[in-house]
């Protein structure tokens, strides 16, 4: 198994922990998991394998940036944009921290407050 395959497998394991609770979809070539029957752009997590790195999208951190307040500089360096984390190699301490962030993000994603936020913002013109 190459290092890149190991990254894909490790990030895939994070995503797989939520497969039984969420519906699999595709958005712009990104495999996503979201609420059953939910809109395509209202997803929880997405995984995309590119040519140079594997990207994990954790959408609740976009809507609730305070989730990122206590992340380490090492994890923050992996960020691209507001909700994407890129990896070309497995860094287990960072992956473990990312798992904890994903767990906190899932709690936010499934909260009634977050659902109302998404409902209001999806109605804007």
Image: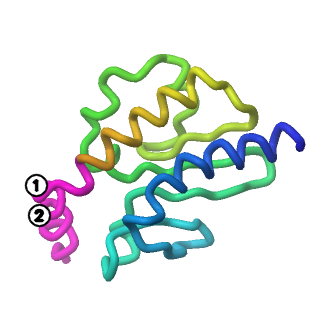
Task: Say which residue label 2 marks.
Answer: 116
Sort mark 2 into few (<14), some (14-19) or many (20+) by Cα contacts within 10 Å.
few
Q: How is the image coloured?
A: rainbow
User: Which contiguous range is marked in magenta?
Assistant: 108-125
| Residue 92, percent from left and from top | 63, 25
Labels 1 and 2 touching (C-beta < 8 A): yes
Vertical side of 106 occupied by 48: above or below: below
| Residue 24, percent from left and from top | 49, 73
> Helix or strand or loop: what does disc 2 sit on?
helix
Q: How many marks?
A: 2
Magenta stretch contains residue 3: no
> Helix or strand or loop: what does disc 1 sit on?
helix
Task: Say which residue label 1 marks.
Answer: 113
Residue at (18%, 66%) from the top-left corner? Answer: 121
Calculate the distance from the C-alpha at mark 1 to the C-alpha at mark 2.
Answer: 5 Å
Vertical side of 106 occupied by 69: above or below: above
Vertical side of 31 occupied by 108: above or below: above
User: In the figure, is residue 45 to the left or right of 77?
Assistant: left
| Residue 25, percent from left and from top | 50, 75
Sort mark 1 into few (<14), some (14-19) or many (20+) by Cα contacts within 10 Å.
few
User: In the figure, is residue 16 to the left or right of 86?
Assistant: left
Residue at (61%, 45%) from the top-left corner? Answer: 11
- The quarter of the picture where the N terminus appears is top right
Residue at (44%, 65%) from the top-left corner? Answer: 20
């Amino acid at each position: 198994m190459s290092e890149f395959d190991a990254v894909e497998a490790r990030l895939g394991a994070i995503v797989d922990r939520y497969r039984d609770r969420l519906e699999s979809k595709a958005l712009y070539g990104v495999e996503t998991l979201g609420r059953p029957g939910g809109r395509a752009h209202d997803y929880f997590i997405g995984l995309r394998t590119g040519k140079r790195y594997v990207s994990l999208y954790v959408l609740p951190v976009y809507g609730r940036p305070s989730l990122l307040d206590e992340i380490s500089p090492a994890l923050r360096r992996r960020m691209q944009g507001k909700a994407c984390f890129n990896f070309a190699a497995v860094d287990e301490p960072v992956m473990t921290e990312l798992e904890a962030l994903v767990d906190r993000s899932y709690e936010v994603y499934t909260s009634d407050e977050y659902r109302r936020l998404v409902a209001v913002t999806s109605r804007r013109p």
